[in-house]
């Protein structure tokens, strides 16, 4: 087992008002290069519009977790798929693992 | 400024950004059940899940956050709807809404008060895990002492 390994590339997503099952996935635990036991996801809103996050695709701008432009959050615990949308306009979210356990 | 908030099935605002400064906060689920975080209309099916012993570190957060627990509404005070003789382990309550298996209740008041733990609930009929020490009459108070329902969130808020 590796005791140190490079983590997968960060996932940069353009998030729009698209809702429902077509909603943008901000952090995908099944993305290429993502392996092992995943923990601690960092999400940065690097765009100009507020993004709303959720763990599924059924939320809206009034129910999702708001992340204003310039804000960031670190979700400490097992990594999950995170979805996002905006109430208007487009923003860019950057997500990646803060720490990672790699199973060889 | 740190404090604990109790979260039930009703959305509760758990983070209020400070009036000035650049706000940071840590929200830590130190309860038993998964919480869901989001806007004012958040529900258990729409929020960002935060499991027990998980936390969210938030930097530059200028908007409020609400939380809801997907595991039920906490029971409120009610009364017995039938007598419960001393040394028995079952009775009826006017309402069992928000009470669940392993909820701890206080029956009665004053010298007659005692705590019991719920083993089963069927409608308004409840069975306790042990026999009562005292007799209780219909109409006596029942209040919730602790519950496996709901959760608590530790909130530590600051500014840069």
Image: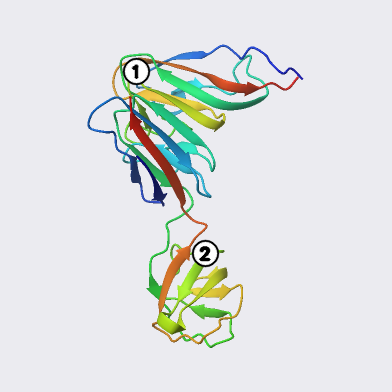
Q: Chain of mark 2?
A: B
Q: CA distance from mark 2 to mark 1?
A: 43 Å
Q: Chain of mark 1?
A: A
Residue B11 is labelled as none
x and y percent of residue B149 in the render? 49, 56
Q: Quadrant of the C terminus of chain B?
A: top left
Identify the residue position indicated by label 2 in the image: B103
Relative height, residue B56 to residue A29 (above, below) = below
Relative height, residue B4 to residue B132 (above, below) = above
Q: Quadrant of residue A7?
A: top right
Q: Quadrant of residue B58?
A: top left
Mark 1 neighbour class, 10 Å CA radius: few under 14, some 14 to 19, many 20 or more: some
Lateral position of residue A44 relative to residue B88, left or right? left
x and y percent of residue B88 in the render? 58, 84
In front of the other: B67 or A32: B67
Residue A70 is labelled as 1
Relative height, residue A47 to residue B57 (above, below) = above
Mark 2 neighbour class, 10 Å CA radius: few under 14, some 14 to 19, many 20 or more: many
x and y percent of residue B117 in the render? 55, 69
x and y percent of residue B18 in the render? 26, 33
């Amino acid at each position: 087992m590796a005791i140190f390994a490079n983590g997968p590339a960060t996932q940069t997503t353009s998030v729009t008002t698209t809702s429902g099952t077509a909603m943008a996935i901000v952090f995908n635990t099944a993305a290429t290069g993502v392996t092992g036991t995943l923990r601690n996801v960092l999400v940065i809103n690097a765009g100009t519009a507020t993004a709303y996050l959720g763990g599924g695709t059924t939320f809206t701008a009034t129910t999702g977790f708001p992340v204003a432009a310039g804000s960031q959050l670190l979700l400490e615990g097992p990594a999950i798929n995170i979805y996002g949308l905006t109430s208007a306009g487009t923003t860019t979210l950057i997500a990646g693992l803060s720490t990672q356990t790699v199973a060889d | 400024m740190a404090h604990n908030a109790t979260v039930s099935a009703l959305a509760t605002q758990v983070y209020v950004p400070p009036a000035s400064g650049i706000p940071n906060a840590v929200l830590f689920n130190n309860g038993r059940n998964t919480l869901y975080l989001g806007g004012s209309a958040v529900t258990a099916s729409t929020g960002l899940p935060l499991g027990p012993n998980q936390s969210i570190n938030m930097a530059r957060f200028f908007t409020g956050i609400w939380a809801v627990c997907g595991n039920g509404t906490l029971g409120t005070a009610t009364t017995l709807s039938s007598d419960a003789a001393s040394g028995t382990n079952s009775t009826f309550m006017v309402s069992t809404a928000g009470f669940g298996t392993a909820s701890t209740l206080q029956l009665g008041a004053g010298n007659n008060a005692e705590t019991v733990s719920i083993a089963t609930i069927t409608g308004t009929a409840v069975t306790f895990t042990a026999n009562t020490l005292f007799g209780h009459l219909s109409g006596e108070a029942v209040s919730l002492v602790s519950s496996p329902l709901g959760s608590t969130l530790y909130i530590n808020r600051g500014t840069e």
